[in-house]
């Protein structure tokens, strides 16, 4: 299991990285934390002729608040996000999710941007990004554009990132008073999910839900929002009964995945269960967050 | 071939490598430190765990060229050849926390990284720290017990100080 | 340190320092790297179109295919055929024309580096004509299916028919029927296989580093295949990262790598990678049991009627049909059953060939039997422990001959007190204590399994002991070690006799250059067999030393005793000699004891050394064990958590209780892997789907429950002087049975748990037949 040969560059700036990509075209691959790309290289499932290492670009690694948004550089390590007080304050869902992602040594290298750009259908971070309505900052030689979470995940291992582009930052609107919850079934802790469910609830002082986001992961090629479930909650008081009804409102057709480790029938059975539990956790969390 | 310079177990080392060589292979083949084991070469088993600038990482998931300028500790750097074992290594022996020894270097390094940050780690933290290190022999229980021994000893020392 | 001490292991320090030397850590100058090219097709006709592009790559030394093999080379023989002629189904070292599984070796690339060899392997031009696959045993048994071999798809089938099964079933108070399936999985040692072979042409000497498990057996086999004298080949076992039954058998690579070293005249190194390991190492466990179990109104089990189908993959390897043979022979377990019928079939399919895996056939049979026994107990409304209590073989009935045989040896349980161990286990675990309360969707259950695990098999074992002039002891054993701690436990045996601390005893094993014969390590035999051989050799050394001192001091032998490595005169401690002094006295040619002879050819003393070979009792010795598990099941998701686990067993004598407990605790977690997680999955075309540790799931630390090992040393085995029973396989043997029973208990009546692994999906759908 040795990779096929490739050339290697380690640019120090975003501009240089993009210039290398433009020169080399589709035979080049960005190397972020390497936790997905390195096994693919070893198995020769990925065969770039040039590997562009992003690890020397300091400007890709940061966590800061800017304009009411939590901005996380694409090369920020998952472990750093898990330990960040800013993230704990403004996007605790991200930390809740990261606890299920791999293990300390993989999180020490694995990056936020690497995982999101890889867009594994069973991965947890895309689910959180969608539930948090993150915005994706994408750079190319033509400049910068911002893609909304709803438009970012386009298919299995496919995102809105185009040839010649680099994901540089994720921006999460701060909603310190919202509550969130996350549940998954994986065969072992740290593995990709069989099904995951994230819930995000904004609850008004009178207990009415003003905004709800429910996202399922590992049920299809991309994480999916469940508008039917969300609609059940918005504008109404949220309680256990409402949550159960909302969870049961997931249309079966939303759940397509059928794989070695779990059938479609099983996923359809547990998706409402996990959704109910995630919503319950989100409601509790919102209660804690409320002033 | 790319010339790569790094610090390994406190010493500066240099070698030439193809970009495709993993850091694990370079540690074993270029630096002759075979205590870093390869159990899967795809980042799941944890046998190749090293400390990269103090943090536990999988050396099969890094290219050797990426380690330019880095400071690396392998199992050979944990206790000097003619010095005694570390408290953790001694606890492993006392608890029969190793059998075939293949996962052992990775386990020891993952736990050393944990105790550096959290000397009084509890059982949950210990389990999480080695959750990415597979052991096929021991059933993990004695490894967790060995780590708890160290944690308790650290706790005792801390409480004596205060 | 003597027998029974919790001695810390002598091998630990090198492993803890990263100074273990595994085969991949060994280097020889000017060595080349080999890569095995393997079939990606389950069943196909194959033609090499061109090797040119591959051969012309910089750094490529040679590429060999079946066409290059020595004329007349035989297939790899079966080491232990049980129920018929295996010859028509054996594997050749390289496939010629037809491949029969994904992973079937077809060529060897030799290059200056592993990476270049892999580059070259991709350039080999082959045409493939796919043939219809035989994906599983159901297809194998279908007469309309493709034939894998001219002799068909069934390697062997056999029947044992004891008592009158039909009559007992017809008149039973309760009868249960179910079909139990155990999935294909494998040992997955954390270290992959590897070999380093070096041929010294001038001296016609071949050294092979990396063999383990049965080095002497495999050397003899290689010598035959290479037509070389056995003495020209030396197998040297380095440190080994686990075997669990699979590693160290004679595989195609065990011929190919030494043979390529001979052919090229340079050292050749082959280090298996994990991806190929999945398709290359012996698979195991794939078995289906159709069980009918009957009991009378008094709660006595009256009959088992079993149809057993085992899927052994594409070829018969060294283990032959031994796994289903063991399962068929030992299915009745520790129960007093006099009516038992089994029809067993060893079927072949387009999958990786199979062999043994820790508790071979037993893990499988115990799951099927103990689930059926629970179903019977439930049907009769008898407590599951009480039901077993009534049916265990009583001590007075031991030794118990089941009436079956495996490996042409009768299945005999030699000794024990099964009911006593059961009672101890039940009370330690608190069988009658209430389970923790169920909370919301979390339901709790408790499971029990009882079993007998055979051990100490194999015809003989040998040991040589040498004492040097300084009183240091070397023990040469015919065993091998894959991590169990034999260097320590065998040192303890020698230490017990020679009264020398284990730190002064070095145990060397797995090297055909150091001892001419050896059985090796399998079937939980090393403590029993090698322990016995070391004990015998140590006793002989002791006798020799006493005889020598008696002669030297001119006293009677019975007036001397060996204490702390010194032979002393009873009642006059100052009169004595250390073992080192005795060794010096016995140095060959030393005139002190034997004056120079007037004529030549007088036999010398051979130093203070001894070599002992001991023979085995055919049925071996067996361990009775009880497994108990508490589980929590999320009935909304099927997610299971094993909350605590206990194994109790009577091992006769534990040389080192710490090592014994380690075997049990580690074995339980391995068994949990086979119960809950591990599966070598294939699609219906015969393509292996699990090729990485990301999809073949080993238990992690989060999956390991608190485990208690109760090691009882009461009923000594009559088969060996130390009374030892082998304990290496007791750990995994009953896990699927106990956990399966616990999950069924948690889910309540009507749950069907008969297919492994017990995934959340299977558990969730256990009460809704057909949904999964």
Image (cartoon, grey):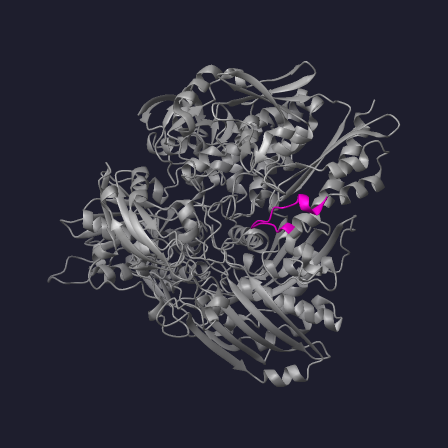
- Residue C253 percent across, percent down from the top left: 32, 53
Outermost front residue: A142
Q: Nearer the viewer, residue C636 or C221?
A: C636
Outermost left residue: C599
- Residue A103 percent across, percent down from the top left: 57, 35
Res. A192 in view: yes
Rendering quarter of residue C293: bottom right
Q: Main secondary structure of the magenta part?
A: loop
- Number of numbered markers: 0
Residue C70 against residue C82 in the figure, above or below: above
Residue B41 against residue C46 in the figure, above or below: above
Q: Nearer the viewer, residue C644 or C624?
A: C644
Q: Nearer the viewer, residue A230 or C559?
A: A230
Rendering quarter of residue A280: top right
Which residue is at a point 51% across and 51% down the rendered structure image?
C659
Magenta span includes C533: no
Magenta span includes A262: yes
Question: In the rendered view, does C518 fall on the left or right side of A183?
Answer: left
Residues rendered magenta in the picture: A251-264
Quadrant assignment for the C terminus of chain C: bottom right
- Residue A221 percent across, percent down from the top left: 59, 40
- Residue A89 percent across, percent down from the top left: 71, 22
């Amino acid at each position: 299991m040795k990779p096929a040969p490739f050339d290697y560059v380690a640019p120090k700036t975003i501009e240089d990285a993009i210039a290398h990509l433009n020169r080399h075209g589709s035979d080049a691959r960005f190397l972020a934390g390497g936790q997905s790309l390195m096994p693919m290289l070893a198995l020769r499932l990925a065969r770039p002729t040039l590997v562009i290492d992003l690890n020397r670009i300091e400007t890709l690694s940061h966590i800061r608040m800017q304009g009411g948004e939590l901005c996380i550089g694409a090369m920020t390590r998952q472990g750093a996000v898990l330990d960040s007080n800013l993230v704990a304050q403004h996007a605790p869902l991200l930390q809740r999710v990261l606890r299920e992602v791999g293990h300390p040594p993989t999180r020490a290298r694995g990056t936020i941007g690497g995982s999101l750009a890889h867009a594994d259908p069973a991965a947890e971070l895309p689910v959180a990004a969608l539930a948090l309505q993150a915005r994706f900052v994408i750079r190319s030689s033509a400049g910068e554009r911002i893609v909304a979470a709803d438009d970012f995940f386009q298919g299995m291992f496919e995102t809105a990132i185009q040839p010649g582009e680099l994901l540089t930052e994720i921006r999460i609107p701060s909603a310190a008073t919202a509550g969130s919850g996350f549940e998954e079934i994986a065969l072992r802790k740290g593995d990709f999910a069989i099904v995951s469910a994230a819930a995000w609830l904004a609850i008004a002082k009178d207990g009415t839900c003003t905004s709800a986001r429910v996202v399922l992961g590992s049920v299809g090629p991309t994480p999916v929002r469940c508008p039917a479930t969300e609609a059940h909650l918005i504008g109404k008081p949220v309680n256990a009964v409402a949550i159960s009804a909302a969870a049961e409102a997931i249309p079966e057709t939303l759940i397509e995945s059928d794989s070695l480790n779990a059938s479609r029938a099983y996923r359809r059975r547990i998706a409402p269960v996990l959704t109910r539990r995630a919503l319950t956790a989100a409601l509790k969390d919102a209660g804690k967050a409320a002033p | 071939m790319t010339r790569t310079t790094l610090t390994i177990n406190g010493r500066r080392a240099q070698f030439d490598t193809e970009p495709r060589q993993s850091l694990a292979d370079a540690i074993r083949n270029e630096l002759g430190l075979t205590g870093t084991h390869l159990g899967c070469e795809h980042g799941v088993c944890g046998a190749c765990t090293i400390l990269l600038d103090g943090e536990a990482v999988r050396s099969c998931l890094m290219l050797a060229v990426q380690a330019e300028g880095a400071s690396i500790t392998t199992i050979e750097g944990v206790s000097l050849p003619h010095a005694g074992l570390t408290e953790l290594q001694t606890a492993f022996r006392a608890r029969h926390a190793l059998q075939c020894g293949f996962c052992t270097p990775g386990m020891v390094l993952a736990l050393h990284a944990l105790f550096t940050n959290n000397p009084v780690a509890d059982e949950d933290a210990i389990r999480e720290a080695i959750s990415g290190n597979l052991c096929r022999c021991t059933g993990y229980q004695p490894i967790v017990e060995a780590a708890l021994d160290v944690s308790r000893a650290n706790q005792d020392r801390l409480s004596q100080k205060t | 340190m003597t027998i029974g001490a919790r001695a810390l292991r002598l091998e630990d320090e090198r492993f803890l320092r990263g100074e273990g030397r595994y085969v991949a850590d060994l280097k020889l100058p000017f060595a080349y790297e080999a890569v095995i090219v393997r079939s990606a097709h389950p069943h196909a006709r194959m033609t090499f179109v061109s090797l040119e592009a591959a051969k012309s790559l910089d750094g490529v030394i040679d590429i060999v295919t079946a066409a290059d093999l020595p004329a007349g080379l035989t297939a790899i023989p079966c080491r232990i055929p049980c129920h018929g002629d295996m010859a028509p189904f054996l594997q050749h070292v390289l496939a010629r024309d037809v491949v029969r599984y994904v992973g079937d070796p077809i060529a060897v690339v030799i290059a200056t580096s592993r990476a270049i060899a892999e580059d070259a392997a991709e350039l080999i031009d082959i045409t493939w004509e796919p043939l219809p696959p035989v994906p599983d045993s159901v297809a194998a048994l279908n007469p309309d299916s493709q034939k894998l071999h001219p002799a068909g798809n069934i390697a062997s089938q056999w029947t044992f028919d004891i008592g009158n099964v039909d009559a007992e079933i017809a008149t039973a108070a309760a009868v249960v029927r179910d079909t139990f399936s155990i999935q294909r999985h494998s040992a997955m040692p954390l270290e992959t296989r590897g070999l380093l072979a070096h041929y010294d042409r001038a001296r016609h000497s071949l050294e092979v580093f990396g063999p383990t498990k049965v080095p002497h057996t495999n050397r003899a086999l290689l010598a035959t295949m290479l037509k070389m004298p056995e003495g020209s080949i030396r197998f040297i076992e380095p440190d080994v990262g686990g075997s669990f039954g699979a590693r160290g058998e004679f595989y195609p690579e065990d011929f190919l790598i030494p043979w390529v070293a001979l052919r090229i005249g340079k050292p050749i190194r082959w280090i298996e990678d994990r991806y190929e390991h999945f398709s290359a190492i012996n698979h195991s466990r794939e078995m289906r049991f159709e069980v009918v179990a009957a009991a009378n109104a008094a709660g006595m089990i009256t009959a088992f009627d079993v149809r057993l189908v085992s899927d052994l993959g594409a070829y018969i390897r060294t283990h032959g049909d031994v796994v289903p043979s063991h399962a068929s022979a030992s299915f009745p377990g520790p129960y007093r059953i006099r009516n038992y019928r089994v029809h067993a079939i060893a079927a072949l399919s387009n999958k990786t060939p199979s062999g043994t895996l820790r508790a071979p056939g037993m893990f499988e049979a115990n799951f099927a039997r103990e689930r059926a026994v629970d179903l019977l107990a439930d049907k009769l409304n008898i407590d599951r422990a009480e039901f077993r209590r009534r049916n265990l073989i009583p001590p007075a009935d031991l030794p118990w001959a089941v009436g079956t045989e495996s490996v042409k040896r009768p299945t005999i349980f030699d000794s024990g007190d099964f009911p006593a161990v059961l009672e101890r286990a039940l009370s330690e675990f608190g069988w009658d204590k209430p389970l923790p309360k169920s909370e919301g969707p979390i339901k709790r259950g408790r499971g029990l399994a009882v079993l007998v695990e055979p051990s100490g098999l194999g015809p003989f074992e040998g040991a040589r002991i040498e004492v040097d002039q300084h009183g240091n002891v070397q023990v040469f054993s015919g065993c091998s070690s894959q991590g169990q701690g034999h260097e320590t436990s065998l040192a303890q045996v020698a230490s017990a006799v020679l009264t020398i601390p284990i730190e002064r005893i070095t145990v060397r094993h797995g090297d055909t250059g150091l001892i001419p014969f050896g059985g090796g390590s399998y079937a939980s035999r090393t403590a029993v067999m090698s322990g016995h051989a070391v004990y015998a050799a140590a006793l002989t050394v002791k006798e020799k030393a006493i005889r020598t001192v008696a002669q030297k001091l001119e006293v009677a032998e019975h007036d001397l005793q060996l204490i702390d490595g010194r032979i002393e005169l009873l009642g006059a401690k100052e009169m004595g000699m250390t073992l080192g002094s005795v060794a010096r006295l016995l140095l060959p040619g030393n005139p002190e004891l034997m004056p120079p002879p007037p004529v030549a050819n007088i036999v010398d003393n051979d130093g203070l050394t001894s070599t002992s070979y001991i023979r085995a009792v055919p049925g071996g010795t067996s361990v009775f064990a009880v497994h108990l598990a508490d589980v929590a099941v999320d009935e909304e998701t099927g997610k299971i958590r094993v909350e605590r686990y206990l194994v109790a067993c009577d091992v006769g004598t534990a040389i080192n209780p710490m090592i014994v407990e380690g075997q049990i605790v580690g074995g339980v977690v391995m068994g949990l892997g086979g119960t809950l997680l591990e599966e070598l999955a294939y699609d219906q075309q015969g393509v292996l789907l699990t090729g990485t540790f990301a999809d073949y799931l080993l238990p992690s630390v989060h999956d390991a429950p608190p485990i208690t090992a109760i090691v009882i040393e009461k009923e000594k085995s009559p088969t060996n002087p130390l009374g030892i029973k082998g304990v290496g396989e007791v750990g995994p043997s009953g896990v699927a049975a106990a956990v399966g029973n616990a999950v069924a208990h948690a889910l309540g009546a009507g749950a069907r748990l008969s297919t492994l692994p017990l995934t959340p999906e299977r558990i969730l759908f256990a009460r809704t037949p057909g949904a999964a």
